[in-house]
Amino acid sequence: MPDRDADPLIVAISSRTLFDLEEGHGLFEREGLEAYADYQREHENDVLAPGIAFPLVRKLLRLNEGAPPEAPRVEVILISRNSADTGLRIFNSIAHHGLSIRRAAFSNGAPPYPYIRPFGADLFLSAHGEDVRAALQAGVAAAMLLPSASRSPASAASRNPDQLRIAFDGDAVIFDDEGERVSREGGLAAFAAHELQRAGEPLSGGPFRGFLDALHRLQQAFPTGEDAPIRTALVTARSVPAHERVIRTLREWGIRLDEALFLGGRSKGPFLEAFGADIFFDDSEHNIVSARDHVAAGHVPHGVANVTR
């Protein structure tokens, strides 16, 4: 039986990542807010097509099967820069697709990120970089998702229809950016020596530590094994001997990751496709470029790799 007192995993998501709003967004950029608002009202009964994060949201909500409505395991909240008026099309599309999304914040053009923490969100996904950075600064795990021209949400959903698969980079995502800073300052040899010397010293948590904890608690509500409804993976550029500190850190935290890929600098995209990730989080824009033609990829603009010089 589900624990009625357990906190659900709460994911806040922008309307532009849930649905394909690129045509309307392009109109907004070309002709302004009034033209955009008129367009959405004219089409408010036209169902929006799924966006890049739609398969992820559907799988997250499917985890509530068997749980009582008053005690869901997962809650998805809509956070949008639309107004409630122009957002009517989004509500209609949510109903059409049968998504159990009950809470929303429409900020009418203002930054919506101040509402993320009051909702208790463990994760925020958006196509708006400013909102993602603000959420990270407020201590919420957040990533920027962008549509990929070479893959569709439908193709992503077909790979593992019954299992949610989430992949994480390590440094500056799950962990802090200590390793990234050492590598940039002294090179790979300095990084390897640094990690070997500190193999028994746990890494500090990064911006996704809290989300990883919440996801791990959710995993514990289900049986383990290959058929579990959630499967996770660490996909990192680290290699031997820098692997040991990662393993010992996760052990210290009491966190289970189902798979770990230590790639030693190999391109991550093909490995993420082989894993079948529904979403992958990384702080490196270079890795996101490699990943996003294979899987949905969220850029985490955190750490030394994202410092503007």
Image: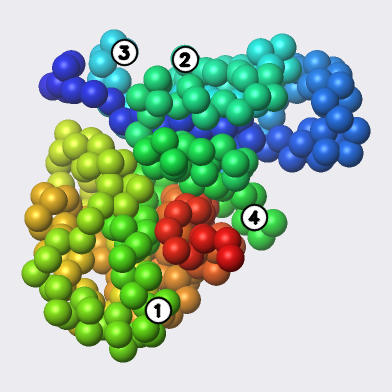
Give the residue at x 52% y 44%. Answer: 133
Q: Which quarter of the figure has residue 9?
A: top left
Q: Are marks 1 and 3 in contact (CB under 8 Å)?
A: no
Residue 83 shows in this picture: yes
Whether residues under marks 2 and 3 lie with C-beta atoms below 8 angstroms apart, the answer is no
Say which quarter of the image contains residue 62: top left
Instruction: Return the disc, 4 or 1, that comes first in the chain's sequence.
Output: 4
CB within 8 Å, label 4 to label 3? no
Q: How crowded is mark 3: few (under 14 residues within 10 Å), some or many (20 or more)?
A: few
How far from the left and from the top, in percent, is residue 189?
31, 88
- Residue at the farthest front position: 309
Give the quadrant of the C terminus: bottom right
Q: Which mark is residue 69?
A: 3
Q: In this view, does 67 lie to the left or right of 125?
A: left
Mark-to-mark CA distance, 4 and 2: 28 Å
Q: How far apart are marks 4 and 1 (CA)?
A: 33 Å
Three-letter residue code for mark 4: Ser
The circle on residue 185 is 1
- Horizontal arrangement in the rendering, residue 23 relative to residue 119 (left or right): right
Which badge, 4 or 3, is on the more N-terminal residue? Answer: 3
Distance (Cα) linking label 1 and label 2: 48 Å
At 30% from the left and 80% from the top, the residue drawn is: 191
Say the numbered circle drawn on residue 148: 4
Where is mark 2, residue-wise?
A: 102
- N-terminal of the two: label 2 or label 3? 3
Vertical placement of 182 versus 251: above or below?
Answer: below
Which is more foreground, mark 4 or mark 3? Answer: 4
Q: Distance between the residues labelled 2 and 3?
A: 11 Å
Residue 219 appears left or right of 188: left
Query: What's the residue type where badge 3 is placed?
Result: Pro
Q: Are circles 4 and 1 on residues that touch, CB within 8 Å?
A: no
* Residue 225 as seen in the image, left or right of residue 49: left
